[in-house]
Image (cartoon, rainbow, N blue to C red):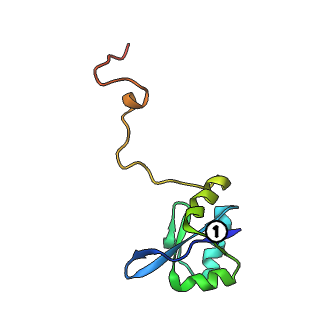
Amino acid sequence: MLYLDPPAVPSRGRLWSHLISDLSYAELHAFAEALGVPRRGFDRDHYDVPAERVPMAVWLGARLVPSREIVLLLRAAGLRRPKPRAHPVPAAREAGISAGSRVPG
């Protein structure tokens, strides 16, 4: 099934929606192509869709859901690809070793 949220994200003078699939990225890419959304609109796990394409997406079968459901649906389907961390955690801190500790070696 394909889902999108109401257009609410402002960017470049337009409002945008997020289009996702709870089945596969292949389904998502095929639907976006049928909708006329270019591949450059794909962002890790969703397509950014301009507000004027939302009625056509719904007509083609996408289900309109509240924005908060988009991530929940992606996670439930195992298709969520979160953004990488802005500041990577140093390996020593991730392993629970404090800065003043010596690593046996």
Q: Is residue 82 left or right of residue 97?
A: right
Residue at the outermost left position: 100
**Amino acid type of the residue tagged 1 in the rendering:** Leu
Residue pushed farthest top?
Answer: 104
Whole-percent x and y of residue 43? 50, 64
Which residue is the site of mark 1?
28
Residue 87, position in %: x, y? 34, 45
- Residue 98 sits above or below residue 64 on the image: above
Residue found at x 63% / y 80%: 57
| Mark 1: few/some/many CA within 10 Å (<14, 14-19, 20+) | many
Q: Quadrant of residue 62?
A: bottom right
Residue drawn at x 52%, y 60% is 44
- Image coords of residue 56 (percent x, y): 63, 85
Quarter containing the N terminus:
bottom right
Q: Position of residue 31 (x, y in %)?
A: 65, 75
Secondary structure of the residue carrying tag 1 is helix
Q: Quadrant of the C terminus?
A: top left
Give me the residue at 55% from left, 67% from top: 67
Count of labels shown? 1
Query: Relative to residue 47, is residue 3 drawn left or right?
Result: right
Q: Say if 70 sits above or below 88 in the image.
A: below
Q: Which of 31/58 is in front?
A: 58
Q: Is residue 84 above or below residue 70?
A: above
Residue at (48% x, 72% y) in the render: 40
Residue 11 found in image quarter: bottom left
